[in-house]
Image (cartoon, grey):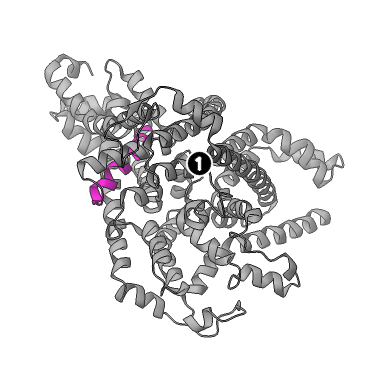
Amino acid sequence: MKQLTKNSLRDRLNLAFFLFPTMLFVIIFIAFPVIFSGYLSLTEFNYASDPAPQFIGLKGYIDMVKSDIFFHTALYNQMRFAVAYFLIAFAVSLVLAIFVNELQRGVQVFQVIFYMPMIVPMSLVGITFAWILSPDLGIFNHMLRLLGLGHITHDWYGEPSTALNSLVLARTWKMIGFTLIIFLAGLQGISKSLKESARVDGANFFQEIVFIVLPNLKPYMLIGGIWILINSLKVFVLPQVITQGGPGSATLTLYLYSWKLAFERLEMGEASQVAYLTAFIILFFTWILNLIFKPETAQKG
Amino acid sequence: MKMVRRREKILFIFVVVFAILFLFPIVWMFITSIRTTQDLYKYPPTLIPHALTFENFVYIFTEMGGFVRYVVNSLVVTISTVLIVLVSSAMGGYAFGMRKFRGQNIMFTMVVGVLTIPYIMYLIPIFLMEYEVGLQNTWLGLIFPYVALNLPWGLLIMRGAFSTIPLDIRDAAIIDGCTEIQMWRKILVPINRPALAATTIITFVFAWQEYMFASTLMTKNEWQTLPVGIVWLRDELQTLVMGRVGAMVIVTILPVLILFFIFRDFFIEGLSEGMLKG
C-alpha cells in the first residue's frame, strides 16, 4: 500500500485507468441524461416542429398536474394497478411461502417452480397471457365454458372493466418468485422450538400462524411489501404489448403515458415532466425501502 | 402427530395445485408450439393436441430470416454487454474496494445512488442523443445504455468482493515485481470468480429480456432483439400463426431455462441482488 502511494504519477495513472470505463459510461449515459431530461422537463419542445427547446420553467409541471386529463387518467390507473397488484402479490406470496415452509420435502423444487417465471422476458409474458386469455381461442375461456361458467367469460384484455386486472394477473405471475423467496428466508429464521412449544400449549395451525409466525415475519413483510409497491409503479411492457394502453385509456400507466408523449406525439418536454413526476413518486418509496434495508445490509457486511 | 401429518398432506396438495397453475403458461406455450395450425385454430379449442409437429420450430429457423436475425442481435448485444460490464466492474470494483483516493466515498455513493433512478428518466435523453449521433439501429446503440444501466450493479457486487481480499496478497505480489495491472489481472480477478458469476447473471438476464430501450431505440425491424422482434412479428405479420409465435417464445426462454436449472442457486441469488431494476 505504502509502496504504491509513493510512486505518485504512476499510481495516479493506474487509478485513472481502473476508474476510466465506469466514469465514461456513468457520465455519458447516466449523469448527462438525468440532467438533460430535467432540463427538458422545464421546456416546451416538440421534436418534429420546434428547432430547439423553449424554456418555460415550472409552468409545464403545473399545467400537467392541474389540467392534463390523460395524466390524471394515467395516475389513477397506475394507482389502481398498484393497489390491486400489491394486495394480490403480497397475499399470494405470503400464503404460498408459509405453506411451502411447512412441507417436509420438496421445498427447493417449489422454490424453483415459483421463481421460474422471472426468467421469461416481460414482453413474452404479455404474448403468452394475451393468447391464454384471448376471447375465442383462449384456453382460459374454454375451461370456464367446460366448467359451466360460460357466463363469466370475457374478452379479458379487450374490455375496460377487466383489462387492468388482467394485466395485474400477468405481472403477478412473473414477479411473485422474488417476494416468495424473501418471505421464505424470513420463515426459515423462525425457530422450530418456538412453534413446537406453541403446539404443545394446544395452539392450532391457524393460531400458530397468527401469533407466532406473522409477528416474527414483520421485518420481511415490510421489505417485501415495499418492494412490491415500488415494482408496481414501473409498469410499461405489459400494457404496451397487450393493450397499447387501451381499450380507450383503461390501461394507460404513467410510464406508458410518458412514452406515448415522447414517441408518438414527440412532445419531449411534456414526456420528461411525466417521467420526472413518476420518478419522484418512485424515489419516495425507494427512499423508504432503503431506510429499512440499511440495518440489514450493515449486519451482512 | 397424526393431525400434523394430515395437515401437511392438505398443504402439499394446495401447493402442488398452485405449482401446476404457475407452470401452466409456459407449458401451454410449449403445447401451442408443437400443434399443427388446423389443430390450433379449431373452435372450440382443445386442451390436448391431436397432431404433434415440430414444423413450427423448423419454419422459424429456415423460412423466417427476421427471427434468425433477432437471435443474432440478442446474442451479440447480450454477450457484448456482459463482457463490457464484467471488465469495467472488475476494474472499478478494484479501485473502489482496494484503493484509497480522495472523493472515493462520494463517488461511490453517487454511482450506487444511480441504482434507484427509474429507467423512464433515461429513455428520452438517450433516444435524442442516439438520434443525433446516429447510434440508433446499431448494436452499439443498445450495448452502451445496457452497460451503463448494469454497471452500477456490477460495481456494487465487485467492490464488495474486492474489499474482502486481504491487502497482504496485493502487497506480496507487488514485492514479487508485478505491476499493479498485472496483479489485478492475474491474481485478484480470478479470486473473485463467484462475484463475477453473479454479475454475469444479472446482466445477462437483463439484456436478454429488456424491452423498453430496445423497442424505442431500435426503430428498424432488422436491428431488434428477440423480446421486441417477436412482438413486432405478431403485430405486423397477418399470416403468422400462433404456433410459430409459441415456437419463438420457447426458443427464447429455453436456453435461459436450462442455465437456470443448472446454476439454480447462483441465479436466485444473482437475480435477487438486482431486483430494484426498472
The chain under label 1 reads A
> What secondary structure predominates along the stretch shown in magenta?
helix
Relative horizontal placement of residue B140, taking residue A283 as reference (left or right): left
Does residue A261 appear to the left or right of B86 in the view shown? Answer: right
Q: Quadrant of residue B134?
A: top left
| Element under disc 1 | loop
Q: Is residue A178 left or right of residue B96?
A: right
Specify few, some or many for label 1: CA neighbours under 10 Å numbering under 14, 14-19, or 20 or more.
many
Magenta residue check for A273: no
Nearest the viewer among A269 and B237 is A269
Q: Is residue B36 visible?
A: no
x 59%, y 64%: residue = A133
Residues in magenta?
A: B136-157
As rendered, which of A226 and A129 lies closer to the eye? A129
- Residue type highlighted by circle 1: Lys
Is residue A237 rendered to the left or right of residue B149? right
In percent of width and height, residue A61 lies at 47, 27
Residue A185 position, x and y percent, is 59, 41
Would you name the residue on which mark 1 appears? A234
User: Residue shown at 27%/22% (left/top)?
Assistant: B99
Locate the N terminus of chain A by quadrant.
top left
